[in-house]
Image: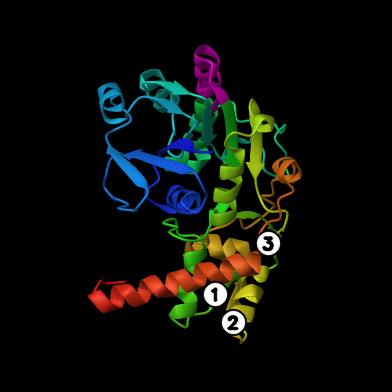
């Protein structure tokens, strides 16, 4: 049975991996809409170019007809959702909104499930990212209003920290850069923080399982592995991957902060989320962290070799 799916975004990181995984599924008819800065040029994918913030471009660039699902990877504001859903031609059966666990008000304790309190305003302490989580909350609200108005089934997905192929954020690459440059990896001492992830391929597979599944309509799900990770665990996993101990530089949290060392994950306290709700629904088993990290490192090294071959500066 054919699934006609429109992906908003889809040109890098989690969106791109979703497209790649969806292409492996029988009966997938995939369309991608984005600004065209990073064309996919994949067989089996129809690309449509436009800016989602311009209603006329949504109407003109995206074909009509019936969509089994629209999967939105880049809705950061209520206006993004309203402009898209209000100007799509044809009928949409299901809208999958990719939100974030950053919408939760207090990440301490946990693991937090989907019923945890949400932000009720911006977070000035986060500087340039002060509005990110709250705007995502408002985008979720807009999706609920618009989907109810238009008779579209809504599923909201809140991924925890995503890692893996095509990751443009300086997360696991912090560790990979230090390893490649033979520099010690700074870790907080003592370790008081723990966090969990979603391997980008697992995320893509869960999203595909959601399409056309009646049990996810009207629901919100965290996407998170149940495996809690620490800085020490990351170093241990890297040592197992490369086959030798990895040199570390343990520093107190205060010293890390004073030196402005850009460690990518929390330094003091937990950041844990429960993905058990969707895992139970699908009987889903997550990729172990050390396996995902190994694949991410392989991809990282491949890109570095490719950059060196064509003379791209690191």
Q: Which quadrant of the structure image shows residue 33?
A: top left
Q: Residue at x 47, y 61 (%)?
A: 165
Query: Depth-wise, is mark 1 or mark 2 nearer the camera?
Result: 2
Q: Nearer the viewer, residue 295 or 24?
A: 24
Image mark for residue 229: 3
Query: Depth-wise, is mark 3 or mark 1 nearer the camera?
Result: 3
Q: Which residues are magenta?
A: 140-153
Mark-to-mark CA distance, 3 and 1: 16 Å
Q: Is residue 296 left or right of residue 33?
A: right
Image mark for residue 104: none
Name the image quarter holding the C terminus: bottom left
Farthest residue, direction front: 1
Q: Return the residue at label 1.
A: 185
Image: 226 above or below 309: above
Q: Residue at x 26, y 22 (%)?
A: 56
Image mark for residue 246: 2
Q: Pointer 1 and pointer 2: residues touching (CB < 8 Å)?
A: yes
Q: Earlier in the sequence, mark 3 or mark 1?
A: 1
Image: 59 above or below 274: above
Q: Is residue 97 left or right of residue 227?
A: left
Q: Is residue 141 magenta?
A: yes
Q: Residue at x 64, y 69 (%)?
A: 290
Q: Residue at x 71, y 55 (%)?
A: 285
């Amino acid at each position: 049975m054919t699934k006609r799916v429109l992906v908003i975004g889809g040109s890098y990181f989690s969106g791109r991996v979703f497209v790649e995984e969806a292409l492996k599924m029988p009966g997938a008819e995939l369309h991608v809409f984005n600004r065209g800065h990073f064309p996919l040029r994949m067989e089996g994918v129809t690309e449509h170019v436009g800016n989602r913030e311009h209603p006329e471009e949504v109407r003109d660039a995206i074909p009509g007809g019936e969509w089994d699902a629209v999967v939105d990877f880049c809705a950061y504001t209520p206006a993004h959702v309203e402009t898209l859903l209000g100007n799509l031609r044809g009928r949409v059966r299901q809208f999958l909104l990719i939100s974030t666990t950053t919408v939760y008000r207090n990440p301490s304790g946990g693991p937090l499930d989907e019923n945890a309190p949400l932000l009720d305003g911006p977070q000035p302490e986060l500087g340039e990212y002060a509005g990110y989580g709250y705007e995502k909350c408002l985008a979720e609200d807009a999706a609920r209003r618009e989907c109810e108005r238009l008779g579209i089934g809504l599923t909201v997905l809140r991924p925890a920290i995503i890692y893996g192929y095509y990751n443009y954020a300086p997360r696991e690459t912090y560790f990979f850069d230090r390893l490649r440059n033979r520099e010690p990896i700074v870790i907080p001492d003592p370790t008081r923080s723990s966090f969990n992830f979603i391997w980008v391929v697992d995320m893509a597979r869960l999203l595909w399982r959601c399409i056309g599944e009646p049990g996810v309509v009207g629901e919100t799900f965290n996407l998170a592995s149940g495996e809690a990770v620490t800085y020490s665990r990351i170093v241990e996993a890297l040592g197992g991957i490369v086959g030798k101990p990895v040199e570390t530089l343990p520093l107190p949290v205060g010293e890390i902060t004073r030196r402005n060392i850009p460690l990518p994950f929390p330094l003091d306290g937990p950041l844990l989320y429960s993905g058990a709700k969707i895992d139970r629904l699908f009987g889903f088993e997550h990729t172990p962290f050390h396996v995902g990290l190994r694949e991410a490192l392989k991809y990282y090294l491949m890109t570095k070799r490719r950059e060196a071959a064509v003379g791209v500066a690191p």
